[in-house]
Image (cartoon, helix red, strand yellow):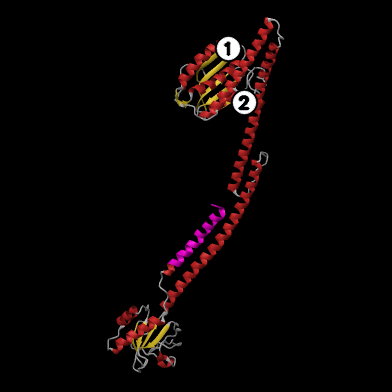
Amino acid sequence: MKLKTQFAVLTGAVTLLPLVFTIIFFGFQQVPHDPRIPSKAFIEALAVRWHSGDVLNIEALKAEAEKAGMPLRDIALIDPEGKVLLSTFSHLKPGDSIKLSDLAPQSRSGNLPLRRSSISGNDHRASNENPKPEFKLNPLDSTRSDSPLVLFDIQPFWTRQDVRNRNLLFIGSFCIILFVVSGVISLIILRSISRAIKTLETDTAIVATGNLNHEVAGSSSHEILLLAKSINLMRLNLKDMLARRSKMLMGVSHDLKTPIALIQGYADALADNVADDPETKAKYLDIIRVKARQLEDLTGELIDFLKIGGDGTATIVEVDPAKMLQSLGQRFESDARLLKRSLSWGFGSDFSRIPGFPIPRKNMNRALVERALENLVTNSFKYSRNEGTIGLRLLLVDGILSFSVTDDGPGIKREDEPYVFDAFYRGSSSRSDGGHGFGLTIVKAVVDLHGWSVTIGKRKDGKEGTEAIIGMR
């Protein structure tokens, strides 16, 4: 759904729903009555009862008013001479007199308002207050001179109608204001988001063409800035990945091209009978075998790397790291003797053969983890001094169960540390060792596959050499 449509729905929900509710609510309310209609019905009902000789009292007056649907506040029944017969007014009592001469000349024609000071008593009860304009004075029968008059207050009619009209006006005005405000705010937000998205679209289109140096700009909106930041991070990661891939391809092509060229050169020399004597032929064939073995090792490492970092289908099972360390330690001890090295293995910093801390079982692919540890130990054999010592331990590093491999070699130079896990990268101390720069890359791939961590650098104990730590989180 487009943003414009979404904001239209928002505006409708915020404004139209209250408006519809108001229409429905007041639609079910009773339509305001004209007070003359129930007043007329009330007077006619009293006239019928008067003509029939019924007794007119306050209860009878209230009953007829209720039947007529007229809210009755106060009422008085007055004879033609101005004497108050019945009254609920606080300032009019039965027996008081009203000067009918103060009324309008057409007072007996019906439905006439009282003038100022038109209500008075026999004594001092004449009201000094201005009468309310809602008072009505009507004769029961305007054709007869002896007909009593009814004085009553219709203010509740006007009060109810005014309150209803005020409520309707207030709610209607509120809905209109809400509609205008929400519409303006929605328009501002929509324009802001549209501009930001248009900017993002333009910048990402430039990046999509391959220009990974173009920075994606955001806007003042916090969410858009976060999105632009994420896109820029993805752009930089992609740029770095492409650079690594290019570097890897260059390394692969170089490491493949050199032995292939040598194999082809010596094979051509043999084919051209350049080597006349058997000793030279044997030398050339030996070189060809060495270079072919290098190609085989390289392709094997490439295949292993692709398998490890590939589809993530490696089988994960629960393994006891303590038994795994014991098995690897015994195997590497014999390798160390052949290479005139010394291997110390065990648990904790003192290489104890009995663990001094609890070692939980871990979920891992044992073959891959052993391959990673083998690469680390092999590197330590390669770069340690003659008759040097290599350490293989299982210990706790910052509360995390970890494998540690140490050696007493020259160590890794600071400028090489950020790149030691890159494919085909060989540090300054290993450029002439005949390797392919894939050993630590495979270690990193195995660790990433398990969701663990790996670091390699100076030894933690401060001694000369290198220490690699695989943290099994």
Residue drawn 33% across the image and 84% down it: 45
What residue does disc 2 label? 423
**Magenta residues: mostly which secondary structure?**
helix
| Local secondary structure at mark 2 | loop
* Quarter holding residue 265: top right
Q: CA distance from mark 2 to mark 1?
A: 27 Å
Q: Is residue 178 above or below residue 113?
A: above
Q: In the displayed image of the protein, which residue is found farthest to the right?
A: 274
Determine whether 95 is above or below 361 in the image.
below
- Location of residue 264 in the rendering, given as x and y in whole percent from the top left corner: 68, 16
417 magenta-colored: no
Work out whether residue 54 or residue 95 is closer to the camera in this orientation and state it: 54
Label annotation for residue 341: 1
At a point 61% along the width and 55% down the height, the residue shown is: 191
Amino acid type shown at disc 1: Arg
- Is residue 310 visible from the viewing direction of this image? yes
The mark nearer the N terminus, 2 or 1, is 1
Q: Residues within 10 Å of mark 2 (few under 14, many from 20)?
A: many
Q: Taking 64 as reference, is 241 left or right? A: right
Residue 445, percent across and down?
A: 56, 27
- Secondary structure at badge 1 equals loop
- Neighbor class of circle 1 (other Cα within 10 Å; few <14, some 14-19, many 20+) is many
Q: Which residues are magenta?
A: 1-24
**Where does residue 337 sit, x and y in percent of width and height?**
55, 10
